[in-house]
Image: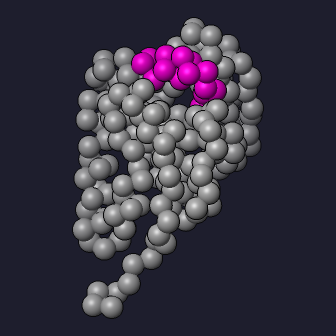
Amino acid sequence: MPTPPPLRSIAVFSGSNFGFNPAYVEGAKALGREIAKRGLQLVYGGTDKGLMGVMANTVLAEGGEVVGIITRLLSDLGHLHPGLTRHEVTQDMRSRKTRMSDCADAFIALPGGLGTFEELFEVATLTQLGEHHKGVACLNIGGFFDPVRSLLNHAVKEGFMKTEHNEMLIFNTDPAALIDALEQWQAPTVTKWIGPAGA
């Protein structure tokens, strides 16, 4: 299985809202500081809203490079962050996700809603299928992703997912430890398919 390239760029998926727990904003800032400290490029959805804006502003304030990739619709609605290092405008959400994936060496999810979950599971699925060999992690601020861990454990228990594919997702509460784990990450070497019961 190919070894992922050294981390130069991380795509972060996160909410365009702030959430009710102040720890979410502080966690986004902490991740932004760590990304900038390591000289990594941040790739994200290009808006100045919610945790997305908090993280981008933090990386920029620390002298880091931020690439925003936003859809035409959201850009036309005025959601594009005005201070990014550079940005791209895509025609739709599918092409936006493809460009974010192409530009990143690994992925981190912060707390968020439907879009964040969808992006997280899509890149994890591509890793599972071997379409790319990039690590996927969740910054588990305030236990936000505990239900995701429980769901994945349940999928393994019920025979829909192998343990190796459950364990390939990294969960940590500390941004530095999370990125350290992504730097050491190796793709699983098993296929996704599970034989029928009794086979």
Residue beneath the point at 25% across and 53% down: 150
Give whichever of 189, 89 is nearer the camera: 189
What segment carries the magenta color? 29-45
Q: Position of residue 92 (x, y in %)?
A: 68, 45
Q: Is residue 119 above or below residue 28?
A: below
Q: Determine the image quadrant of residue 114.
A: top left
Give whichever of 88, 187 is nearer the camera: 187
Q: Would residue 53 be visible to someone looking at this image?
A: no
Q: Report whether 89 appears left or right of 140.
A: right
Q: Report whether 103 appears left or right of 42.
A: right
Q: What scheme was used to colour the molecule?
A: one colour
Q: Position of residue 91 (x, y in %)?
A: 74, 43
Residue beneath the point at 36% across and 55% down: 167
Q: Would residue 65 be visible to someone looking at this image?
A: yes
Quadrant in the picture for the N terminus: bottom right
Residue extending furthest toward the bottom: 199
Residue beneath the point at 57% across and 8% down: 61
Q: Position of residue 183 (x, y in %)?
A: 51, 38
Q: Position of residue 27 (x, y in %)?
A: 38, 22
Magenta stretch holds residue 41: yes
Magenta stretch holds residue 34: yes
Residue beneath the point at 44% across and 17% down: 29
Q: Report whether 16 appears left or right of 154.
A: right
Give whichever of 79, 46 is nearer the camera: 46
Q: Is residue 129 above or below residue 168?
A: below
Q: Is residue 90 above or below residue 20?
A: below
